[in-house]
Image (cartoon, rainbow, N blue to C red):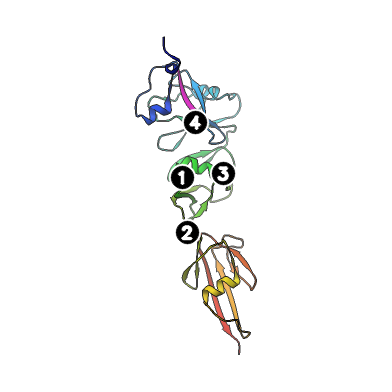
C-alpha cells in the first residue's frame, strides 16, 4: 500500500523538477481566488475540467466564475467549466478564479494576463512578474515617461491607458529632474519653487530687483504642467520632470 506521502503528486514539484507527473490518487495544484494568495487544492484526475478545479478550491460552479491557468511562460489561459486541462504537459500549477464573467486584458513584459476585477494592486503585478528587489514594475506610457508602480499602489483598470506593464531596474533613491536643460538630483518628491531657483542659479543672492519665473511639465502632481509661483510646491516623478527658470533683472 502507498504511504501517505505517495498518495499525491505535487504538480509544482513536477514542473520545477522537469519530470512527468507520477501516478497518484490525487494531484496538488495551487488556486487563488481574486488574489495571488495561492492555496493548495487537490484533484483526482490529472486532466481535470474547469469545474473540478473550482470544486477543489471550494467554489460553487453555479456562480459566474472566470478561471485562468498561469502557464509556465507567465501567460494566462482561460479555462471553461467543461473544458479539460492536462496537468501532465502544460507546465501549469497555479490557477486564479474570479467571481465574475467580466475580465480586463493586461500585458506584463509581453505576457498576456487576465484580471477579473476593475482594480489591481501593485503587489499582484510584482508577484506575477517574479522580479527581485532590484527591479520594479512600470506602467508603460506611450509617448511619455513610464510610471513606476509600487506594491501598495491600487490601479483602476477602467481608466484609459492602464493596460501595459513592464519590468526594469528600480531607479536609485532620490529623484532626477531637469532644470534649464541640466539634470539635477533631489532627495524628496516634493520640490519647492525656491529649491528649483537655487538649482537653476546656484548661490544666487536675494536681490530686490531680481524676479524669477518658472514653468514645469511632466510632473506627478496635477496639473502635470503649468507655472510655479514663489512659495509653490510641485510633486515630481522619479525621472523626467522638467523645469524652466527665467531670471529677470528690473531696472
Percent coordinates x, y for residue 137 in the rendering? 48, 49
Q: CA distance from mark 1 to mark 2?
A: 18 Å
| Vertical arrangement, residue 32 with respect to residue 198, above or below | above
Closer to the chain start, of discs 1 and 4, is 4
Res 108 label: 1
- Please give the name of the residue rendered at 42% of the width and 45% of the height, measured from the top-left corner: 110
Q: Is residue 194 magenta?
A: no
Percent coordinates x, y for residue 188 in the rendering? 56, 62
Q: Which of the 4 image quarters holds residue 233?
A: bottom right
Q: CA distance from mark 1 to mark 4?
A: 17 Å
Disc 1: CA contacts within 10 A as few (<14), some (14-19) or many (>=20): many
Report the magenta residues as a range.
Answer: 26-30
Residue 52 vs residue 212, the one in the foreground = 212
Q: Which residue is mark 4?
A: 95
Between marks 2 and 3 in the image, the one whose residue lies nearer the viewer: 3
Q: CA distance from mark 3 to mark 4?
A: 18 Å
Farthest residue to the top: give it: 1
Q: Which residue is mark 2?
A: 143
Amino acid at each position: 500500500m502507498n504511504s501517505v506521502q505517495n498518495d499525491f503528486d505535487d504538480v509544482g514539484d513536477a514542473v520545477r523538477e522537469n519530470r512527468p507527473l507520477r501516478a497518484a490518487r490525487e494531484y496538488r495544484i495551487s488556486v487563488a481566488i481574486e488574489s495571488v494568495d495561492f492555496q493548495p487544492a487537490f484533484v483526482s484526475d490529472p486532466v481535470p475540467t474547469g469545474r473540478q478545479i473550482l470544486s477543489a478550491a471550494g467554489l460553487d460552479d453555479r456562480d459566474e466564475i472566470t478561471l485562468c491557468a498561469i502557464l509556465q511562460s507567465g501567460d494566462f489561459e482561460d479555462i471553461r467549466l467543461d473544458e479539460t486541462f492536462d496537468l501532465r504537459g502544460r507546465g501549469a500549477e497555479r490557477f486564479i478564479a474570479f467571481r465574475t464573467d467580466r475580465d480586463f486584458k493586461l500585458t506584463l513584459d509581453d505576457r498576456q494576463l487576465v484580471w477579473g476585477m476593475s482594480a489591481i494592486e501593485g503587489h499582484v503585478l510584482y508577484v506575477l512578474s517574479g522580479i527581485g528587489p532590484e527591479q520594479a514594475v512600470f506602467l508603460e506610457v506611450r509617448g511619455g515617461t513610464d510610471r513606476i508602480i509600487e506594491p501598495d499602489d491600487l490601479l483602476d483598470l477602467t481608466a484609459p491607458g492602464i493596460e501595459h506593464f513592464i519590468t526594469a531596474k528600480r531607479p536609485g533613491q532620490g529623484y532626477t529632474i531637469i532644470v534649464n536643460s541640466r539634470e539635477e538630483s533631489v532627495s524628496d518628491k516634493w520640490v519647492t519653487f525656491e529649491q528649483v531657483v537655487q538649482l537653476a542659479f546656484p548661490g544666487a543672492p536675494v536681490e530686490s530687483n531680481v524676479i524669477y519665473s518658472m514653468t514645469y511639465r511632466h510632473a506627478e502632481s496635477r496639473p502635470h504642467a503649468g507655472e510655479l509661483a514663489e512659495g509653490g510646491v510641485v510633486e515630481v516623478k522619479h525621472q523626467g520632470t522638467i523645469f524652466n527658470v527665467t531670471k529677470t533683472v528690473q531696472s
